[in-house]
Amino acid sequence: MKNKAGLTVIFFTVFIDLMGFGILVPILPSFASKDLGISDTGIGIIVGVFSFVQFLLNSFFGKLSDKIGRRPLLLSTLLITSCSYILFSFSHNFLMLFISRALAGIGGSNIGVAQAYIADITTKEERAKGMGMIGSAFGLGFVFGPVIGGLLAEYGYSVAGYASAGFSFIAFIFALFVLPESLPEDSVKQKISYKIFDIKYALKLQKDNFIIAVLVLIFFIGVFSVANIHGTLAILGMKVHNFTDRQNSYLFGIMGLVGVIIQGFGIKYLTRIFEEKKLVLAALIFIMIGLALIPFGGGLIGISAAVFIMSIGTSINQPIIMSMISKYSPEAEQGAVLGLNQSIASLGRVIGPVWGGFSFDYFGYQFPFLTGAAFTLLALVLSFNVFKSVHFNK
């Protein structure tokens, strides 16, 4: 590693912030449904607006970080995230909840910046491990966050919102005093386009670098497939199986725990044994099987087993593809490319929950999960054909 200390700091910064985010994940659908009377379709929109804002801003923030540095953007977005959770605690109708999640989306548009930070301080050989540590930080946030959220919800949903705000503010203070700038002072400063979503840059990337374009597409399809369950998994538990908020939190905790084990410890061994493209194919198979099994789990144990299978796939797929994208990106455009990838992935996280809530509402509770499985199969077929025909020489 070029900078192990910096990697440790960014890990803890992301972990603390994501723990705050994880608190709200299992309880947001039940809060919207029980307390505010919002429909399943409306819940899908509430979940989706967070990612829609990320779709608009991730690429821009990534490019901006190439210009002004990673640290200023990481600090400001952490503070915005904290404010969004305060607004959540005061939400008493659809509009306020919608605005709070949109504001959280602005704060959450720093993922590409965090990934660029990792790219700054790791060698290409260590890139997958570095990206895996980001995934591990996410995973730990989803281990502790949902469990804490499920417990705090028993004292009121606003209490959970205040706790989330507190964790994000702690992450802000921690980063303010400890997080160094990762962008070298002598790096080439790119002229950036101050556009919310730079379509021209995306088209240029597709034209100039076929490999990156295909990897971004595969990443998008995979994200959309899993995003179908972002709001509907908790609704499935609540409305079909009568799960409590605490029981729903266990499902998200499983996702986080699997992510920690695989991305924090297993990914470095897997990449030594297997080629990255083979790992992607295996990961997509796990995701497809897990998604297809969730609606037929029959209860907490069965659904937990299906979520476990799916989580193995997602924990391998995301850091590997992000590592591959980073390796094939120009060094001076790491923030721009990774930010663009996160923006396009965020579009999948918009369409997925909206379709998931709508299909749950109108076609039945199985549809969001089966839709995800079908699109994962599409990504698997695309990946197999592209990996077979394109030589990955890095």
Image (cartoon, rainbow, N blue to C red):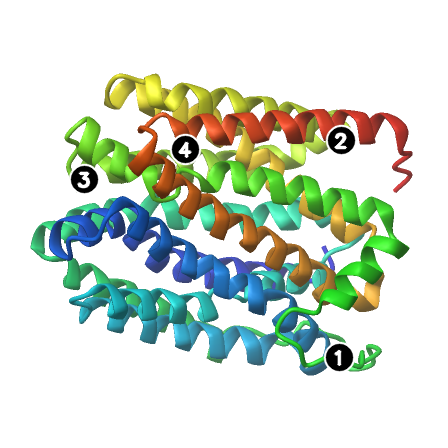
Using the rendered image of the protein, determine whether residue 73 is visible from the camera's viewpoint: yes
Q: Where is residue 237 in the image (x, y as percent from the top left)?
A: 23, 32
Q: Which mark is residue 368?
A: 4
Cα–Cα span, label 2 and label 4: 27 Å
Using the rendered image of the protein, determine whether residue 329 is visible from the camera's viewpoint: no
Cα–Cα span, label 2 and label 1: 32 Å
Residue 354's place in the image compared with 17, above or below, is above
Cα–Cα span, label 3 and label 4: 22 Å
Q: In the picture, which quadrant includes the C terminus?
A: top right
Q: Judging from the image, what secondary structure is the residue with disc 2 in?
A: helix
Q: Residue 377 carries which label?
A: none
The residue wearing badge 1 is 192
Q: Nearer the viewer, mark 2 or mark 1?
A: 1
Q: Judging from the image, what secondary structure is the residue with disc 1 in?
A: loop
Q: Nearer the viewer, residue 166 or 346?
A: 346
Q: Nearer the viewer, mark 3 or mark 1?
A: 1
Give the amino acid type for the residue marked by disc 3 in the picture: Arg
The residue wearing badge 2 is 277
In the image: residue 241, left or right of residue 169: left
Q: Judging from the image, what secondary structure is the residue with disc 3 in?
A: helix
